[in-house]
Image (tube, coloured by chain):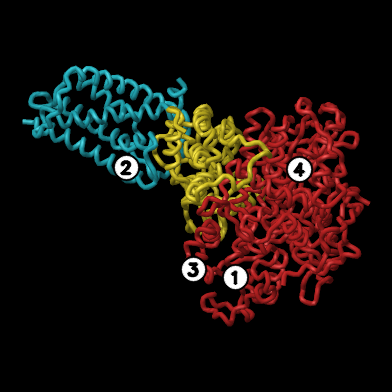
Chain colours: A red, B yellow, C cyan
Amino acid sequence: MLDGKCPSGPIHEKWDRRKQELKLVSPANKRRYKIIVVGTGLAGASAAATLGELGCNVEAFCYQDSPRRGHSIAAQGGINAAKNYPNDGDSIFRLFYDTVKGGDFRAREANVYRLAMISNSIIDQCVAQGVPFARDYAGYLDNRSFGGAQVSRTFYARGQTGQQLLLGAYAALMRQVRAGSVKLYPRTEMLDLVIVDGEAKGITVRDLVSGDIKCHAADAVCLCTGGYTNVFYLSTNAMGSNVTAVYRAYKKGAFFANPCFTQIHPTCIPVSGEHQSKLTLMSESLRNDGRVWVPKNKGDERPPSEIAEPERDYYLERKYPAFGNLAPRDIASRAAKEVCDEGRGVGPGGYGVYLDFEDAIKRLGENTIRERYGNLFEMYERITGEDAYKQPMRIYPAPHYAMGGLWVDYNLQSNIQGLFVLGEANFSDHGANRLGASALMQGLADGYFIISYTIADYLALTKPGSVNTGHAEFRRSIEDVNASIKKLLSINGRRTVNEFHRKLGRIMWEYVGMSRNEDGLKKALAVIPELRAEFWENVTVTGSGEELNQELEKAGRVADFLEFAELMARDAFYRNESCGGHFRVEHQMPDGEAKRDDEDFCYVAAWEFKGINKEPELHKEPLSFEDVKPAVRSYK
Amino acid sequence: MDLNLFVWRQKRPDEKGAMERYEAEDISPDMSFLEMLDVVNEELIKRGMEPIAFDHDCREGICGMCSQVINGIPHGPREKTTACQLHMRNFKDGDTIYIEPFRAKAFPVIKDLIIDRSALDRIIQAGGYISAHTGGVPDANTILIPKEDADTAMDAAECIGCGACVAACPNGSAMLFTAAKVSHLAVLPQGKIEAARRVCVMTEAMLKEGFGNCGNHYECQAACPKGIKVKFIAKLNREYIKAQIGIK
Amino acid sequence: MRFFQNTVGRKIIVAATGQIMVVFVVLHLLGNPLNPYPVKLPDIGSLKQLLRVLLLLSFIFHAFLGVQVAIENRAAKPQTYVVRKKFHTNFAAENMLWTGILAAAFIIYHLLGASMPGAGSGYIGTVIYLVGLTALFLHLYHGIASFFQTVGCNNERTLPVIERIGKGMAVIMLVGYAYMMLLNWP
């Protein structure tokens, strides 16, 4: 039985109590501690900047050429906070409640409450940094509403909120680099976690320019490496987003929690052909003003303008009158798949639904719509060649976010001492489904306002600099990494890395995608190891290890995806219930809603690695709900 | 459609590179430019040849990682569009396309189309921030910002740091990049406090990194995938004069 | 001294000294004894010496910093593109160094006492004057408007207007001086 080590007391006092309990490191001593931060998205950049500012020695790593390029930058819609500026009935408790309910009661209550509490400080922090949030004419901050909420609590900076928040965190990080407290390692990829006497003491990395394999020792390691939805090959993640860092930590003993909880985003641009390399998300905020519909009749191939009002099915408004087009992501996604499976989808291939702005343009004028979503409409036009002011957009769901991740306790520490996991890379706050505009909130909460307190508690009990890279574990790690690179380069098969990745993606989308069933999952568990075996016999990786080699980088990542995919399918197989983004067709309400099984599955599934081709061991952290009563998650 | 490509190939930073010719066959107009390169690379790999190395990541026009000059234009012929968002419907069958890396002394080539842009990070390090501590800041709504100012700040803050401005500039100057950050922060009340120091240290850092001086050619504005305007360079110049004569 | 090493600081000096010389070029045209419609400039007496010093200093600073900036700019772009498309820049903007050097040489030649080419001055003098005038014209074609951007007196609305006025001024200077050259031709 796993213990999340949540503090005791009433929910609104838990975080304060914990802060009181946590040990501190005196300012003079902080300098002596070295902390490794891997990844420089919202969580990583904010953590590295904050820890550096507090006086620790930080080393920050990212695979991109600059820390400003973490994929948080692509988040469009906004960031939630319980400020209640619009006076529409919001509160910390309501944000907490909405998040727990949105996550279909599979998140840890205490974590979510803390997140809701901190949300307000994040907005203050970002404004102080100069993030140009949208303002009203009186100069106050503006809010918009978002899926899964009946209040307007989302702060935004045009359609580039993630970019602006990340640039804020990046600027804070750059300030610390200048101050000398953070040392930056761009174009550097973590390939192994080094554990000494059961505690995380460093990482092994590959310099992506020279190909050098090197070790870095530290007193603690923070993984802020994002999500793994590129396991589907096509997703809204960046091309380089990968599971490698967290997966290799998993192989070193860190538990992987709820890997099957992935989110499919309802508003993405549909696939246009076999060549497709990634999917582009259109911010969910579009659903504020756009109406989702498909033709009532199957195979209706007329252009949308010729389909009259009575022949259209506004299926979200019909099925979920209270939330309408703002139904939560998983529900909206499945509803889209459903109508397309019925043969009522639109666009090439029939896998798309309309998102129509005609009414909004009539009501608010084209200028208002342009002001709100101008950049999204432009982006849509660039990709599809269609003008969404004149004809409805076509959208379709796409893998977008991983709620699952490495298991962490309330202090964001994994089961391995000294290993902390922040942001999307951990599992903690979103349960089985994440509400829109909450990812940015979590990344920054973890990085700015949680880790600095909790990591100190660990450091206070640790002797600084106790391990250096001369230790045998580091040498072994380097040997392992070198051996696997050598292996990849020596196979010289006939199929490219991309071909394997694409094939894996198809398996995952088919069997472990939006809706899953026992037979499909069994099938996935059978074919993934076959594909993996073929990969290790037949993949071809050009070039050498001693140079910039993008094929080699990809090969390493895909190799990890090929192992991780099995874990994900296994978790989906064992979780014999439907909840949030995890939809098992065997378990649904008569109206097709997800049917939870709180009796048997109200727990966090944390998996322990036992060897490749061996079944991992399941550890359970039971979830108890004291402040929110688990109810049927209804958005009708 | 079929295309003729001439691509800059260079194995290492210190090696001499050259343009090499490739054929891209059966290209769909719905592909992005980078997906077209993916197809070419898959072919090269299958023939046992080294694929073309190019930087890319988000492929939705926001991370700023792509860095190619396509037919003499950073990010290619479509205005306000990054290479990853440029789609092949902008080309026609039989076209010849020249693909080169962003060129500037401050952006040394690492391999093929990949360049080192860390100089831009160092310009930001010099002072492209507001020195706010984590925590201890006032409630967000105690700082009122006129909507027009917030909008102007956002116009400048949209910079994705790709370096197309440097690539397009005949002088290899990073003035538009620097001006965007200086302006974004100087417009906001929170940023005004450090504005004078910021504009001085950032412009000094720009020169130190080996970028050229602004010659008012305005090629940067034409190349910027986010449409950042040279009016921000005028703003930077203004901020610099204000800093010199001590106007707040 | 940081001002004189700063990229913007130097450009402001180059722009300001350039504009001072532009004023002189305009006045020189207006009050020129060859001008058939001479404008009577106010007699400033001893101030004249001071202005001469100002002009000389402007010339020195403009030339020195201009060349320094141009050398740096060339160094910042060591390799050009195989194919390159231009959008806004033009021949004049791209050749400020060369037109500047030519114009400077011409001015020195002019100051050394070479009067307007006329009867008996021969073709060489005429060619020198024509080349010098053209170089000056090209230099001003980019330089006059550039001044306003460099000193920050510019925004989206004013930019195209200032550019047109600057280019127009350059054309007027070219036509004005060329016209007087013609008048001087017997």
State the residue position of label 2. C163
Tell me how far mark 4 sits from mark 1, CA to CA: 39 Å
Query: Given the image, on which type of amino acid does mark 3 rest?
Result: Lys
Element carrying mark 3:
loop
Tell me how far mark 3 sits from mark 2, CA to CA: 37 Å
- The crowd level at tag 1 (other Cα within 10 Å; few <14, some 14-19, many 20+) is many
Residue at mark 2: chain: C
Query: Given the image, on which type of amino acid does mark 2 rest?
Result: Glu
Residue at mark 3: chain: A
**Residue A390 tag number:** 3
- The crowd level at tag 2 (other Cα within 10 Å; few <14, some 14-19, many 20+) is some
- Do the residues marked 4 and 1 share a common chain? yes
Residue at mark 1: chain: A
Query: Given the image, on which type of amino acid does mark 1 rest?
Result: Arg
Residue A378: % across, % down:
52, 58
- The crowd level at tag 4 (other Cα within 10 Å; few <14, some 14-19, many 20+) is many
Q: Nearer the viewer, mark 4 or mark 3?
A: 4
Element carrying mark 2:
helix
Element carrying mark 1:
strand
State the residue position of label 1. A291
State the residue position of label 4. A450
- Rendered image quadrant of residue C123: top left
